[in-house]
Image (spheres, helix red, strand yellow):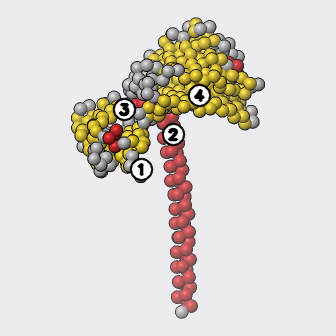
Amino acid sequence: MIRRLRTLVSGLVVTSLLVVPGTAAAQTTEIVADTGGASLQLTVLGTPVQIGVVLDELGQITEVTVGGETVTSEGTSKVRVVLGDDPAATAVVEVKAKKDKLRTQVRATTLDGLVGPQSWSGKLFGSDVPTTVTFDVTNDGGVPGIANIVVGAVSPADATYEVRGPSTKVEHDEAEAEAAILFRWNGYDMKLKIEVEVENDDDHGLMAKLKVELKGKDRQRLRNQLLADIAGQRTWQGRGCNGEAYEVTYTISSVDGSLTVDSATVDGIPVTGIEIHDHRFEVRFPDSKARLEVSTRQNGDGTWDLKVDSKTTEKCRDDDDDDDEYRKKKDDDDDEYRNKKDDDDEYRNKKDDDDEYRKKKDDDDDGDD
Protein backbone atom coordinates (compact mmCIF):
# COMPACT_ATOMS: atom_id res chain seq x y z
CA MET A 1 0.00 0.00 0.00
CA ILE A 2 1.34 3.46 -0.89
CA ARG A 3 -0.10 6.56 0.68
CA ARG A 4 1.10 10.16 0.40
CA LEU A 5 0.86 12.73 3.13
CA ARG A 6 2.21 16.26 3.58
CA THR A 7 2.11 17.37 7.18
CA LEU A 8 4.21 19.81 9.17
CA VAL A 9 5.95 17.76 11.86
CA SER A 10 7.99 19.80 14.35
CA GLY A 11 9.52 21.83 11.54
CA LEU A 12 9.98 18.81 9.25
CA VAL A 13 7.77 17.69 6.40
CA VAL A 14 6.58 14.14 5.84
CA THR A 15 6.89 14.05 2.06
CA SER A 16 6.02 10.44 1.35
CA LEU A 17 4.99 7.26 3.11
CA LEU A 18 5.59 3.71 2.07
CA VAL A 19 3.82 1.06 4.11
CA VAL A 20 4.91 -2.50 3.50
CA PRO A 21 1.66 -4.38 4.11
CA GLY A 22 1.44 -7.43 6.34
CA THR A 23 -1.21 -10.00 7.17
CA ALA A 24 -2.90 -11.16 10.34
CA ALA A 25 0.02 -13.41 11.17
CA ALA A 26 2.37 -12.20 13.87
CA GLN A 27 5.94 -11.02 13.44
CA THR A 28 7.38 -10.74 16.96
CA THR A 29 7.75 -12.98 19.98
CA GLU A 30 5.37 -12.58 22.88
CA ILE A 31 7.76 -10.68 25.10
CA VAL A 32 8.23 -7.92 22.50
CA ALA A 33 4.56 -7.89 21.50
CA ASP A 34 3.62 -7.46 25.16
CA THR A 35 5.37 -4.08 25.25
CA GLY A 36 2.55 -2.70 23.12
CA GLY A 37 5.09 -0.69 21.13
CA ALA A 38 7.43 2.19 21.99
CA SER A 39 7.69 5.97 22.11
CA LEU A 40 10.75 7.88 20.92
CA GLN A 41 11.79 11.51 20.72
CA LEU A 42 14.65 11.69 18.26
CA THR A 43 16.60 14.71 17.08
CA VAL A 44 16.44 14.58 13.29
CA LEU A 45 17.95 17.33 11.10
CA GLY A 46 18.30 19.47 14.22
CA THR A 47 14.63 19.20 15.21
CA PRO A 48 12.98 17.01 17.91
CA VAL A 49 10.59 14.52 16.31
CA GLN A 50 8.17 12.46 18.37
CA ILE A 51 7.66 8.91 17.04
CA GLY A 52 5.07 6.53 18.44
CA VAL A 53 4.70 2.83 17.60
CA VAL A 54 1.69 0.73 18.59
CA LEU A 55 1.77 -3.09 18.41
CA ASP A 56 -1.17 -5.43 18.75
CA GLU A 57 -1.06 -8.55 20.91
CA LEU A 58 0.55 -10.49 18.06
CA GLY A 59 3.29 -7.95 17.44
CA GLN A 60 1.90 -6.42 14.25
CA ILE A 61 2.34 -2.66 13.86
CA THR A 62 -1.14 -1.16 14.05
CA GLU A 63 -0.18 2.50 14.25
CA VAL A 64 2.84 4.74 13.71
CA THR A 65 2.71 8.44 14.54
CA VAL A 66 5.22 11.13 13.66
CA GLY A 67 4.89 14.47 15.46
CA GLY A 68 1.41 13.51 16.64
CA GLU A 69 0.19 12.80 13.11
CA THR A 70 -0.87 9.23 12.34
CA VAL A 71 0.92 8.02 9.26
CA THR A 72 -0.40 4.47 9.24
CA SER A 73 -2.98 2.38 11.00
CA GLU A 74 -2.54 -0.75 8.91
CA GLY A 75 -1.44 -4.07 10.39
CA THR A 76 2.07 -4.54 9.05
CA SER A 77 5.63 -5.42 10.04
CA LYS A 78 7.46 -2.49 8.46
CA VAL A 79 6.78 1.24 7.99
CA ARG A 80 9.00 3.75 6.17
CA VAL A 81 8.58 7.54 6.29
CA VAL A 82 10.61 10.22 4.45
CA LEU A 83 11.13 13.52 6.28
CA GLY A 84 12.14 16.82 4.71
CA ASP A 85 11.48 18.68 1.43
CA ASP A 86 15.08 19.39 0.45
CA PRO A 87 16.64 16.41 -1.39
CA ALA A 88 20.03 17.43 0.03
CA ALA A 89 18.71 17.37 3.61
CA THR A 90 16.23 14.57 4.07
CA ALA A 91 15.92 11.75 6.58
CA VAL A 92 14.18 8.40 6.46
CA VAL A 93 12.46 6.86 9.47
CA GLU A 94 11.90 3.12 9.37
CA VAL A 95 10.02 1.10 12.00
CA LYS A 96 10.20 -2.67 11.89
CA ALA A 97 8.72 -5.39 14.12
CA LYS A 98 10.10 -8.82 13.35
CA LYS A 99 10.61 -11.95 15.42
CA ASP A 100 12.23 -10.92 18.73
CA LYS A 101 12.96 -7.29 17.74
CA LEU A 102 11.25 -3.92 17.56
CA ARG A 103 13.53 -1.47 15.76
CA THR A 104 13.34 2.21 14.88
CA GLN A 105 15.96 3.47 12.46
CA VAL A 106 16.66 6.97 11.17
CA ARG A 107 18.85 7.44 8.12
CA ALA A 108 20.27 10.87 7.21
CA THR A 109 22.69 12.13 4.58
CA THR A 110 25.09 13.51 7.22
CA LEU A 111 26.01 12.60 10.78
CA ASP A 112 25.07 16.13 11.88
CA GLY A 113 21.51 15.27 10.86
CA LEU A 114 21.37 12.88 13.83
CA VAL A 115 23.35 14.84 16.44
CA GLY A 116 21.49 15.84 19.60
CA PRO A 117 19.49 14.47 22.53
CA GLN A 118 17.51 11.26 21.96
CA SER A 119 14.95 9.37 24.03
CA TRP A 120 13.32 5.91 23.99
CA SER A 121 10.46 4.73 26.20
CA GLY A 122 8.75 1.35 26.42
CA LYS A 123 6.89 -0.99 28.76
CA LEU A 124 9.02 -3.95 29.80
CA PHE A 125 8.06 -7.41 31.07
CA GLY A 126 4.30 -6.71 30.95
CA SER A 127 4.50 -3.62 33.16
CA ASP A 128 1.93 -0.85 32.78
CA VAL A 129 4.59 1.78 33.53
CA PRO A 130 7.11 2.66 30.79
CA THR A 131 10.87 2.68 31.32
CA THR A 132 12.72 5.58 29.69
CA VAL A 133 16.29 5.74 28.35
CA THR A 134 17.89 9.01 27.21
CA PHE A 135 21.21 9.57 25.45
CA ASP A 136 23.03 11.96 23.12
CA VAL A 137 24.42 11.38 19.64
CA THR A 138 27.67 13.25 19.07
CA ASN A 139 30.01 14.03 16.17
CA ASP A 140 33.75 14.04 16.83
CA GLY A 141 35.35 14.99 13.53
CA GLY A 142 33.06 12.72 11.54
CA VAL A 143 33.21 9.86 14.06
CA PRO A 144 29.84 9.14 15.72
CA GLY A 145 29.52 8.85 19.48
CA ILE A 146 26.94 7.97 22.13
CA ALA A 147 27.10 9.88 25.39
CA ASN A 148 25.15 10.70 28.57
CA ILE A 149 23.15 7.46 28.75
CA VAL A 150 20.57 7.78 31.52
CA VAL A 151 18.11 5.03 32.49
CA GLY A 152 15.08 6.34 34.33
CA ALA A 153 13.09 4.46 36.95
CA VAL A 154 12.79 0.86 35.73
CA SER A 155 9.46 -0.96 35.89
CA PRO A 156 8.70 -3.54 37.26
CA ALA A 157 10.29 -2.13 40.39
CA ASP A 158 12.32 -5.30 41.07
CA ALA A 159 13.81 -5.35 37.56
CA THR A 160 17.52 -4.61 37.20
CA TYR A 161 19.62 -3.19 34.38
CA GLU A 162 23.22 -3.02 33.20
CA VAL A 163 24.66 -0.46 30.77
CA ARG A 164 27.24 -1.84 28.36
CA GLY A 165 29.39 0.63 26.43
CA PRO A 166 29.40 2.94 24.70
CA SER A 167 32.20 1.86 22.39
CA THR A 168 33.44 3.23 19.07
CA LYS A 169 34.99 1.44 16.12
CA VAL A 170 36.58 3.09 13.07
CA GLU A 171 37.50 1.06 10.02
CA HIS A 172 38.57 2.63 6.72
CA ASP A 173 35.82 5.06 5.70
CA GLU A 174 33.25 3.63 8.12
CA ALA A 175 32.70 4.34 11.82
CA GLU A 176 30.28 3.00 14.40
CA ALA A 177 29.31 3.75 18.00
CA GLU A 178 27.38 1.19 20.03
CA ALA A 179 25.83 0.85 23.48
CA ALA A 180 23.34 -1.50 25.08
CA ILE A 181 21.19 -1.65 28.19
CA LEU A 182 20.45 -5.17 29.40
CA PHE A 183 17.25 -5.44 31.49
CA ARG A 184 16.57 -8.47 33.71
CA TRP A 185 13.46 -9.54 35.59
CA ASN A 186 12.32 -12.86 37.03
CA GLY A 187 14.64 -14.83 34.76
CA TYR A 188 13.78 -12.89 31.59
CA ASP A 189 16.21 -10.70 29.60
CA MET A 190 15.51 -7.77 27.29
CA LYS A 191 18.16 -5.66 25.56
CA LEU A 192 17.90 -2.13 24.24
CA LYS A 193 20.63 -1.67 21.64
CA ILE A 194 21.71 1.75 20.36
CA GLU A 195 23.87 2.10 17.25
CA VAL A 196 25.10 5.11 15.28
CA GLU A 197 26.84 4.37 11.99
CA VAL A 198 28.54 6.38 9.28
CA GLU A 199 29.31 4.58 6.05
CA ASN A 200 29.75 5.05 2.33
CA ASP A 201 26.86 3.29 0.61
CA ASP A 202 27.37 2.23 -3.01
CA ASP A 203 23.90 3.48 -3.94
CA HIS A 204 23.47 6.54 -1.69
CA GLY A 205 26.99 7.77 -0.95
CA LEU A 206 27.76 8.97 2.59
CA MET A 207 25.05 7.81 4.95
CA ALA A 208 24.49 8.12 8.72
CA LYS A 209 22.14 5.83 10.64
CA LEU A 210 20.72 5.77 14.15
CA LYS A 211 19.19 2.48 15.27
CA VAL A 212 17.31 1.94 18.52
CA GLU A 213 16.28 -1.69 18.89
CA LEU A 214 14.53 -3.60 21.67
CA LYS A 215 15.14 -7.32 21.63
CA GLY A 216 13.79 -10.09 23.83
CA LYS A 217 12.83 -13.76 23.60
CA ASP A 218 10.03 -15.50 25.48
CA ARG A 219 12.61 -17.44 27.46
CA GLN A 220 12.94 -17.68 31.24
CA ARG A 221 16.07 -18.74 33.10
CA LEU A 222 15.98 -18.98 36.90
CA ARG A 223 19.35 -20.16 38.15
CA ASN A 224 20.69 -21.27 41.54
CA GLN A 225 17.28 -21.18 43.20
CA LEU A 226 16.14 -22.92 46.36
CA LEU A 227 13.69 -25.67 45.42
CA ALA A 228 11.14 -24.18 47.80
CA ASP A 229 11.25 -20.91 45.84
CA ILE A 230 10.41 -22.44 42.46
CA ALA A 231 8.17 -25.33 43.58
CA GLY A 232 4.42 -25.23 43.11
CA GLN A 233 2.02 -24.62 40.27
CA ARG A 234 2.97 -22.26 37.43
CA THR A 235 1.16 -21.10 34.30
CA TRP A 236 2.65 -20.17 30.93
CA GLN A 237 0.58 -18.32 28.32
CA GLY A 238 1.31 -17.51 24.68
CA ARG A 239 -0.31 -16.92 21.31
CA GLY A 240 -0.21 -18.58 17.92
CA CYS A 241 0.19 -17.09 14.48
CA ASN A 242 -3.54 -16.59 14.06
CA GLY A 243 -4.14 -15.26 17.55
CA GLU A 244 -5.09 -18.55 19.19
CA ALA A 245 -4.47 -18.59 22.95
CA TYR A 246 -2.02 -21.15 24.32
CA GLU A 247 -2.00 -22.01 28.01
CA VAL A 248 0.02 -24.62 29.91
CA THR A 249 -0.25 -25.16 33.65
CA TYR A 250 2.38 -27.32 35.32
CA THR A 251 3.62 -28.17 38.79
CA ILE A 252 7.18 -28.41 40.13
CA SER A 253 7.45 -30.95 42.96
CA SER A 254 8.73 -29.58 46.25
CA VAL A 255 10.22 -33.01 47.00
CA ASP A 256 12.43 -33.80 43.99
CA GLY A 257 11.88 -30.96 41.48
CA SER A 258 10.09 -33.23 39.02
CA LEU A 259 7.52 -31.78 36.61
CA THR A 260 3.85 -32.58 36.09
CA VAL A 261 1.70 -31.09 33.31
CA ASP A 262 -1.67 -30.26 34.80
CA SER A 263 -3.25 -28.91 31.59
CA ALA A 264 -2.34 -27.74 28.10
CA THR A 265 -4.91 -26.04 25.87
CA VAL A 266 -5.37 -24.07 22.66
CA ASP A 267 -8.36 -21.73 22.92
CA GLY A 268 -9.51 -23.87 25.83
CA ILE A 269 -9.29 -27.16 23.91
CA PRO A 270 -6.92 -29.75 25.43
CA VAL A 271 -3.66 -30.56 23.64
CA THR A 272 -2.49 -34.16 23.38
CA GLY A 273 1.00 -33.66 21.90
CA ILE A 274 2.90 -33.73 25.20
CA GLU A 275 6.22 -35.46 25.85
CA ILE A 276 6.92 -35.86 29.57
CA HIS A 277 10.01 -36.93 31.51
CA ASP A 278 10.71 -36.54 35.23
CA HIS A 279 12.48 -33.20 34.92
CA ARG A 280 11.50 -32.08 31.43
CA PHE A 281 8.40 -31.82 29.30
CA GLU A 282 7.63 -30.49 25.83
CA VAL A 283 4.26 -29.42 24.45
CA ARG A 284 3.86 -29.20 20.68
CA PHE A 285 0.79 -27.25 19.65
CA PRO A 286 -1.29 -28.67 16.77
CA ASP A 287 -1.33 -27.16 13.27
CA SER A 288 1.72 -24.97 13.96
CA LYS A 289 5.46 -25.01 14.67
CA ALA A 290 4.84 -23.60 18.15
CA ARG A 291 6.13 -25.44 21.19
CA LEU A 292 6.91 -25.04 24.87
CA GLU A 293 9.74 -26.81 26.67
CA VAL A 294 10.21 -26.69 30.45
CA SER A 295 12.99 -28.34 32.45
CA THR A 296 14.43 -28.36 35.96
CA ARG A 297 17.94 -29.35 37.04
CA GLN A 298 19.68 -29.72 40.39
CA ASN A 299 23.14 -28.22 40.70
CA GLY A 300 26.07 -29.65 42.64
CA ASP A 301 25.51 -27.24 45.53
CA GLY A 302 21.90 -28.37 45.95
CA THR A 303 20.31 -25.34 44.22
CA TRP A 304 18.02 -25.67 41.23
CA ASP A 305 17.69 -24.17 37.74
CA LEU A 306 14.38 -23.68 35.94
CA LYS A 307 14.34 -23.24 32.16
CA VAL A 308 11.19 -22.25 30.25
CA ASP A 309 11.70 -21.94 26.49
CA SER A 310 8.94 -21.27 23.97
CA LYS A 311 8.73 -20.90 20.20
CA THR A 312 5.46 -19.24 19.27
CA THR A 313 4.87 -16.26 16.99
CA GLU A 314 8.54 -16.04 15.99
CA LYS A 315 7.91 -19.22 13.99
CA CYS A 316 5.40 -17.41 11.76
CA ARG A 317 6.85 -16.69 8.32
CA ASP A 318 4.99 -14.46 5.92
CA ASP A 319 7.19 -11.44 5.17
CA ASP A 320 9.35 -10.57 2.19
CA ASP A 321 12.66 -11.14 4.00
CA ASP A 322 11.69 -14.66 4.89
CA ASP A 323 10.41 -15.27 1.36
CA ASP A 324 13.75 -14.07 0.00
CA GLU A 325 15.55 -16.34 2.46
CA TYR A 326 13.31 -19.22 1.42
CA ARG A 327 13.95 -18.54 -2.28
CA LYS A 328 17.70 -18.28 -1.67
CA LYS A 329 17.70 -21.58 0.19
CA LYS A 330 15.64 -23.13 -2.58
CA ASP A 331 18.07 -21.81 -5.22
CA ASP A 332 21.01 -23.13 -3.19
CA ASP A 333 19.28 -26.50 -2.85
CA ASP A 334 18.52 -26.53 -6.58
CA ASP A 335 22.14 -25.68 -7.40
CA GLU A 336 23.35 -28.39 -5.05
CA TYR A 337 20.94 -30.83 -6.64
CA ARG A 338 22.07 -29.87 -10.16
CA ASN A 339 25.74 -30.14 -9.18
CA LYS A 340 25.12 -33.53 -7.63
CA LYS A 341 23.22 -34.61 -10.71
CA ASP A 342 26.13 -33.49 -12.92
CA ASP A 343 28.49 -35.49 -10.71
CA ASP A 344 26.18 -38.50 -10.98
CA ASP A 345 26.05 -38.13 -14.78
CA GLU A 346 29.85 -37.89 -14.88
CA TYR A 347 30.08 -40.96 -12.66
CA ARG A 348 27.66 -42.88 -14.88
CA ASN A 349 29.52 -41.87 -18.03
CA LYS A 350 32.82 -42.95 -16.47
CA LYS A 351 31.22 -46.19 -15.35
CA ASP A 352 29.90 -46.81 -18.87
CA ASP A 353 33.42 -46.21 -20.24
CA ASP A 354 34.86 -48.62 -17.66
CA ASP A 355 32.24 -51.23 -18.52
CA GLU A 356 33.00 -50.82 -22.21
CA TYR A 357 36.73 -51.13 -21.49
CA ARG A 358 36.21 -54.29 -19.44
CA LYS A 359 33.98 -55.77 -22.14
CA LYS A 360 36.58 -55.03 -24.83
CA LYS A 361 39.34 -56.46 -22.63
CA ASP A 362 37.29 -59.64 -22.05
CA ASP A 363 36.69 -59.97 -25.79
CA ASP A 364 40.41 -59.50 -26.47
CA ASP A 365 41.27 -62.06 -23.80
CA ASP A 366 38.79 -64.52 -25.33
CA GLY A 367 40.38 -64.00 -28.73
CA ASP A 368 43.86 -64.71 -27.30
CA ASP A 369 42.59 -67.95 -25.86
| Residue behind mark 1 | 301
Find the distance from the CA under tag 2 to the CA under tag 1: 46 Å
| Residue behind mark 2 | 325
Front residue of 214/285: it is 214
Find the distance from the CA under tag 3 to the CA under tag 1: 41 Å
Q: Nearer the viewer, mark 3 or mark 2?
A: 3
Q: Nearer the viewer, mark 3 or mark 4?
A: 4
CB under 8 Å between discs 2 and 1: no
Q: Amino acid at mark 1?
A: Asp
Mark 4 lies on a secondary structure that is strand
Q: Position of residue 357 (x, y in %)?
A: 56, 77
Q: Position of residue 89 (x, y in %)?
A: 68, 16
Query: Which corner quadrant of the image does residue 235 belong to?
Result: top left
Other-residue count near label 2 (Cα within 10 Å), few / some / many at <14 / 14–19 / ≥20: few
CB under 8 Å between discs 4 and 1: no
Dot 2 or dot 1, earlier in sequence: 1
Front residue of 150/107: it is 150
| Residue behind mark 3 | 241
Mark 2 lies on a secondary structure that is helix
Find the distance from the CA under tag 4 to the CA under tag 2: 26 Å
Dot 3 or dot 1, earlier in sequence: 3
Which image quarter holds the C terminus?
Answer: bottom right
Query: Which corner quadrant of the image does residue 107 belong to?
Result: top right
Dot 4 or dot 1, earlier in sequence: 4
Other-residue count near label 4 (Cα within 10 Å), few / some / many at <14 / 14–19 / ≥20: many
Q: Position of residue 227 (x, y in %)?
A: 34, 43
Dot 3 or dot 2, earlier in sequence: 3
- Please give the name of the residue rendered at 60% of the width and 12% of the height, measured from the top-left corner: 48
| Residue behind mark 4 | 194
Q: Amino acid at mark 2?
A: Glu
Q: Nearer the viewer, mark 4 or mark 1?
A: 1
Dot 4 or dot 2, earlier in sequence: 4
